[in-house]
Amino acid sequence: MLWLMSIVVPVPKTEQRLLRVREVADVMRVSSMTVYRLIKSGELVATRVGRSYRIWDGDVDAYLGRGGG
């Protein structure tokens, strides 16, 4: 999502990036374990890729927009 003058504009998934847990942790300034806990609790949507998780950057923005982190 893009924030333009306090208006949320949805961005199609094709224009978004898939982030690794470590990248999400860096953006949110939390530990990787906290990101895994958010995924497990369902607060943060993630996609399983093999044995690891990937999170759409739009889902991170949405979580932070809800007041998380």
Image (tube, rainbow, N blue to C red):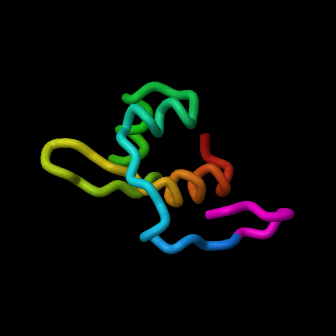
Q: Quadrant of the N terminus?
A: bottom right
Camera-side residue of 26 and 32: 26
Q: Quadrant of the C terminus?
A: top right
The vertical placement of 37 against 13, above or below, is above
The vertical placement of 37 against 54, above or below, is above
Q: Farthest residue toward the top?
A: 31
Q: Is residue 11 magenta?
A: no
Q: Is residue 13 left or right of residue 58?
A: left
Q: Farthest residue toward the right?
A: 5
Q: Farthest residue toward the front?
A: 15
Residue at 22 percent of width and 42 percent of height: 52
Q: Position of residue 10 (x, y in %)?
A: 61, 73
Q: Position of residue 39 (x, y in %)?
A: 37, 48
Q: How many numbered marks, from 0 up?
A: 0
Residue at 65 percent of width and 56 percent of height: 66
The vertical placement of 64 against 12, above or below, is above
Which image quarter: residue 65?
Answer: bottom right
**Magenta segment boundaries in residue numbering:** 1-8
Residue at 56 percent of width and 36 percent of height: 27
Q: Is residue 61 left or right of residue 38?
A: right
Q: Is residue 5 left or right of residue 53?
A: right
Which image quarter: residue 36?
Answer: top left
Q: Is residue 6 magenta?
A: yes
* Magenta span dominant secondary structure: strand
Residue at 67 percent of width and 62 percent of height: 2
Q: Position of residue 47 (x, y in %)?
A: 29, 57
Q: Position of residue 15 (x, y in %)?
A: 48, 66
